[in-house]
Image (tube, coloured by chain):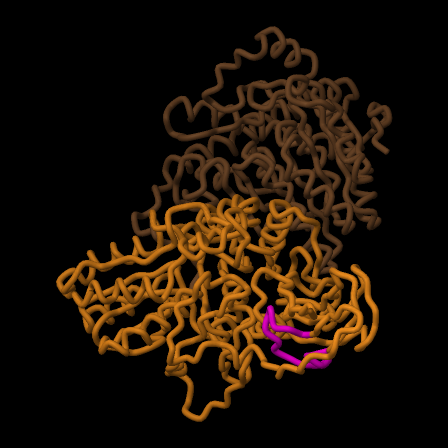
Amino acid sequence: MPTPILMPALSPTMTEGTLAKWLVKEGDTVKSGDVLAEIETDKATMELEAVDEGVIGQIVVPAGTENVAVNAVIAQMQGEGEAEVARPTIKAAKEELPQESEAPEPVAARAPVAAVARPASRPAPPDPDLPAGTPMKMTTVREALRDAMAEEMRRDANVFVMGEEVAEYQGAYKVTQNLLQEFGAKRVIDTPITEHGFAGIAVGAAYRGLKPIVEFMTFNFAMQAIDHIINSAAKTLYMSGGTLPVPIVFRGPNGAAARVAAQHSQNYAAWYAQIPGLKVVAPYTAADAKGLLKAAIRDPNPVVFLENEILYGQSFEVPDVEDYVLPIGKARIARAGKDVTIVAFSISVRDSLAAADLLAGEGIEAEVIDLRSLRPLDRAAIVKSVQKTNRIVAVEEGWPTCGICSEIAAIIMEDAFDALDAPLMRVTGEDVPMPYAANLEALALPTPAKIAAAARAVCYRS
Amino acid sequence: MATKSADPKKKTASADQLLQFYRDMLLIRRFEEKAGQMYGMGLIGGFCHLYIGQEAVVVGIQAALSDKDAVITTYRDHGHMLACGMDAKGVMAELTGRVGGYSRGKGGSMHMFAREKNFYGGHGIVGANGPLGTGVAFANKYLENGELCVAYFGDGAANQGQIYEAFNMAALWKLPIIYVIENNQYAMGTSVTRSSAQTKLYKRGDAFGIPGAQADGMDVLAMLEAAEKAVAHVRAGKGPYILEAMTYRYRGHSMSDPAKYRSRDEVSRIRKERDPIDHLRDRLLADKLADEEKLKEIDRDVKAIVTEATEFAQSSPEPDPSELYTDILIDAA
């Protein structure tokens, strides 16, 4: 029996990759540990090693093939004397994804082997402030963030980026790719693994007039630096009677990635959104990531910029214009509707748009509001939508207690109580430390099905 | 690597400079005594950490710096602000929480800043100003302006982990910073011997290759001499330097400190034998660099400054209620 060699998952969030190069050819005898091929992910190039002894029977996926799905058969290993088996056709990952009209409900949505829900079939309306016919370019969130930093570093010599692996490694998640090459080691600075210390150094540099961008490998590690973010950065303008500004950006992935368990999966949106003196941004699309990161870097205040690891590789249309900057503090209608408002941010916008697709099939037209900024929060946009739909579901990946959804519930009580035809419902991460097991992890997170169920409930359609 | 400084008695200074030191130290002493009194009268609230006894440290070190060099310190900061040339009226009015204070009454004793004097606070979290000062030095190097930063902190902060994170990066990147450890023997109520495995705090940079020296923090000339060496090292581009000032605070950690952790005798003995101001006064008289009349004149001047500050700090109004919601964010352009 031939043994299949499968496309490996080389990171917690990898769903597909490029088979860059074969280092063996058909008929070669290999033993365990031999390098068979080089696999390129969106983060890095990795070597694939043989785990068994045998003879390479067939190379199914030729070198240079892109978008090879994780777990796809890329070659067959044979025992001696075995006949060559039929060559299966190559299927790229994108073709294997569920059709959008199927409105996928992912099982273990974040696991690398599972299908990832794609953006909803109806793309978000373009930025209403953009003139019609603005050229667009498909860009990943990762590239959009990098482009934003590069553009701002070209514009202002006092902007620099520091963090773990941002320079020579090209970014732990490749977000700072090529910045070292363009701007040099003076402005793209690898730090030791000392979040508390380098966050403090960056804040001190901001006191002295520089404009640091601090990359945290994830916001989970920023918990070690949170004293400087809050006590040294957020409060200083006030404590100085307005005399000492702190222009700084703290950015990095926030919230759950995939299968990295409790210490690497926390969502800090509500923590930072509570702090006066900070601005807090959490974009979903690549266009928002670019426009808002540029705004954050220019902002004279400390800005916490919450990214999402799973979204880094997703592509969106980004206006192909010079200097695309968006205002912080403005929500966006990601999908217009009249029956129920779904308010979300970051990756929950993806799930909410998928839920809206499900609901559309049942005759419920959901309006999805992408908050984009969490502080300041666009109260007016939320209230305006609820005054139209009279029903609201609030969604966040983080924990329910004292969360962003709790804040939205309070806003609705204060400003839109009379508009409501049903009580607000929340869909949040479950009130547990993030479990590792794939099934439990999937249960712990918001899903399109949970959001759709809540929307039906507030529409009295369940 | 770490060495004790040479015999400080050799250090000399001009009569003018010595008189200036006397005046600067006396201003801090009288200011702090008045602040303690006003605290007792309920005019100053919250925490109030007095610098009495430690005056020679900041006065000696500041004399070795240029006006453009930056300073950052802890919550025991009134002396540093006065030594940086900040106005006594603005400092005292901040202590009373009035709009005429450096932070318009919003910061208080521990949180004052003066960018025009290159003074970056005034920080209330023990150890935080270590990395923050290192960041100011990072900016100075980035901007290639030739300026250095002095980060003052105490023997208590010397045990904070973030100090060593800062030491590591400062040494790695050769940042222009002097860490001054003001060893006043007690971190709040815990003596150095009870809190520190290595009590020679100037050696705390050994692991990072940062040179350190210890000097008598009760002797302004010893501090000046030690600071000049530190400044020369840093200005030569050799990276950070640690200066441990052996000093003593006469008052409690804060105003509410009952000081049960040390004896009254210990305090009065040091006060009698090692007081930095008395020490300098005796020297000025013995060396005939000033007469009693000249010193009385300085006393009167200093008293007038403190009196004026005290009056201002009581006559300046409290901030307008509308100030509650100002200075939280700067309007983005």
Name the residue at the top extreme: B265
As drawn, the chain in brown is B
User: Residue A165, percent across and down?
Assistant: 69, 58
Q: Residue at x 64, y 14 (%)?
A: B271
Does residue B168 show up? yes
Viewer-closest of B30 and A294: A294
Please identify the quarter of the rendering in which residue A393 is found: bottom left
At x 68%, y 43%, the residue is: B166
Provide residue B270's location: percent of width, then percent of height. Answer: 66, 13
Residue A27's spot in the image, x, y percent? 82, 76
Q: Is residue A62 magenta?
A: yes
Figure chain in orange? A
Residue A149 spot, x, y in % from top left: 60, 70
The residue range painted magenta reads A59-74
- Taking depth in this image into account, of A61 and B154 the one nearest to the observer is A61
**The quarter of the displayed image where residue A92 is located:** bottom right
